[in-house]
Amino acid sequence: MSSRKIATRDVIVILLVALLWGANFSFIGTSLGTVDPYMLTALRFFFCVFPLIFFLRKPQAVGLKFIALYGLLFGAGMAWLLNLGIAWGVNPGIASLLLQFSAFFTVGWGVMFFGEKLNRIELGAIALALVGLGLVIHTSGDNLSITGVLFVLLAALCWSLCNIIIKLCGLKDAFAFLVWSCLFAIPALFLATYLVQGPTPFVQLFKGYEASAYFSIMYQAYISTLLGYWVWNKQMHKYPVSQIAPYSILVPIWGLVISWWVFEESTNAARLAAIGLTLSALALFISARRLELLMGKTTQLTPH
């Protein structure tokens, strides 16, 4: 697919999706105050599936094993581990930043299984991101749980595997695929909730939650998951990946800003610098292929 200018309307839509996804991390943080993290994930995917699955046919061109594996990795992997990470002490803003490390994992799988190559810009960006991650942890002190960080990074790893599945299965009907895949996450999530947490989350579920918790769950299911991924995948299909992918860096920016506003978090210059370095490394990595192409064209135009 050749490069072409993104329509103004589509740019606005992409920016809106980035904002909605960035806000989702704070919605998770607020709902975890009253809802068990296991149950929160299970309810999110329950409402992703029902009642929509009764109106959507199972994607015919995709094997059931791809649908099931994606659902387990997306729901019982990425979303569940992300919720656990935030519950264990990673503030929503930092979680939004750490989850973007999925880009590094995705390219790593490409190198391992598809024979793709990393250029020097990408290697440098990875090194900068690792330095930035270390500085974020160091400057956060006791306010950041290392266990929580590991949970979120594992969530990023699961998300990268989801990207590989999408690449392998040749996805066309993204919305139906998403709804049907979420169906396979529900039994695993409810079972994990009972095995680890016992009957308490289910008792609380039948007693009911505050209105804000229900709103948060609906937002995570319908706005962030179904609407967000449908719109984003539609733009990825319409334009080259190299043109859409750089906009994903706006997600952790919105995530950090909204988290600081909602939770009134304090910070310092050193931590801001560490976050800025990590964001810059992510932006550089996402744009590396396009930068390499531009540099190659510039070299060809320069007389020797």
Image: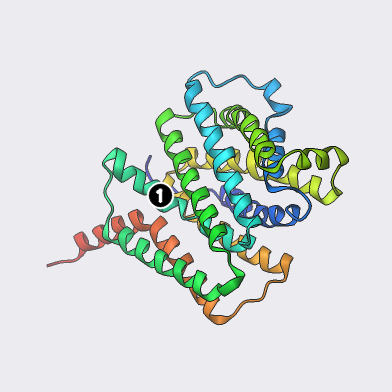
- Residue drawn at the location 66% of the way across and 76% of the way down: 266
Residue at screen point 59% across, 50% down: 82
What amino acid does circle 1 point to? Phe
Res. 234 in view: no
Above or below — where is 51 with respect to 82? above
Identified at 48% across, 39% down, the residue is: 162
On the image, the x and y values in percent for residue 118 come to: 28, 53
Q: Is residue 193 shown left or right of residue 203?
A: left
* Vertical position of residue 73 compared to residue 9: above or below: above
Residue 39 higher or lower than 188, as above or below:
below
Percent x, y of residue 48: 68, 34
Name the residue nearer the viewer: 242 or 229.
229
Mark 1 neighbour density, 10 Å: few (under 14) some (14–19) many (20 or more): some
Q: Would you say residue 169 is visible in this rendering?
A: yes
Return the residue at label 1.
105
Q: Quadrant of residue 79?
A: top right
Residue farthest toward the left in the current orientation of the protein = 304
Residue 32, how many percent across, how many down?
A: 73, 53
Quick one: 222 or 264, which is closer to the camera? 264
Who's the residue at 59% across and 28% down the image? Answer: 184
Q: How many marks?
A: 1
Badge 1 element: helix
Which quadrant: the N terminus? top left
Left or right: residue 140 versus residue 125 is: right
169 on left or right of 98: left
The C terminus, quarter of image: bottom left
- Where in the figure is residue 289, as x and y percent of width and height? 33, 54
Judge by depth and name the residue closer to the eye, 36 or 228: 36
Q: Residue furthest bottom?
A: 269
